[in-house]
Image (cartoon, rainbow, N blue to C red):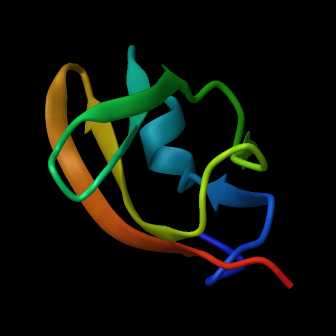
Amino acid sequence: ISPLPFNEEFQIEIPDYYLISTALTWKILNPFGQILKEGILRDKISKIEMAHFADGLYYLSVDVNGKRSHTKKLIKLRK
């Protein structure tokens, strides 16, 4: 995930061995666990736009075949 912290968008780079998976999905969560945005990862490098979100702390959750695989902390800051 880069850059961190981010301003308007960040990108996710997926290792090749995950690309053969049948389903890679992502979710942006607030600190209370509410889903704010979600999508499907189809490419090795994907950009996620969050320009309209307020500055603050978020979490990125990536699921592989419907099971949570990774959760990372995100910090959005304006320049």
Residue found at the very far top of the displayed protein: 22
Q: Left or right? Give the position of 21 relative to 34.
A: right
18, 6: nearer the viewer: 6
The quadrant where residue 13 appears:
bottom right
Quadrant of the frame with the N terminus? bottom right
Does 75 sit above or below residue 29? below
Q: Left or right? Give the position of 66 relative to 79.
A: left
Q: From where the camera sits, is residue 11 visible?
A: yes
Q: Left or right? Give the position of 34 relative to 74.
A: left
Residue found at the very far front of the displayed protein: 54
Query: Which residue is rendered at x = 34% and y = 67% of the image?
Result: 72
Q: From where the camera sits, is residue 45 visible?
A: no
Query: Which residue is rendered at x = 42% and y = 34% of the image?
Result: 26
Does 7 sit above or below residue 44? below
Q: Count the marks: how many?
A: 0
Query: Which residue is rendered at x = 41% and y = 27% of the image?
Result: 25
Query: Which residue is rendered at x = 53% and y = 56% of the image?
Result: 15
Does 24 sit above or below residue 69? above
Residue 42 image position (x, y, % from top left): 64, 24
Residue found at the very far right of the displayed protein: 79
Residue 60 image position (x, y, % from top left): 39, 53
Quadrant of the frame with the C terminus? bottom right
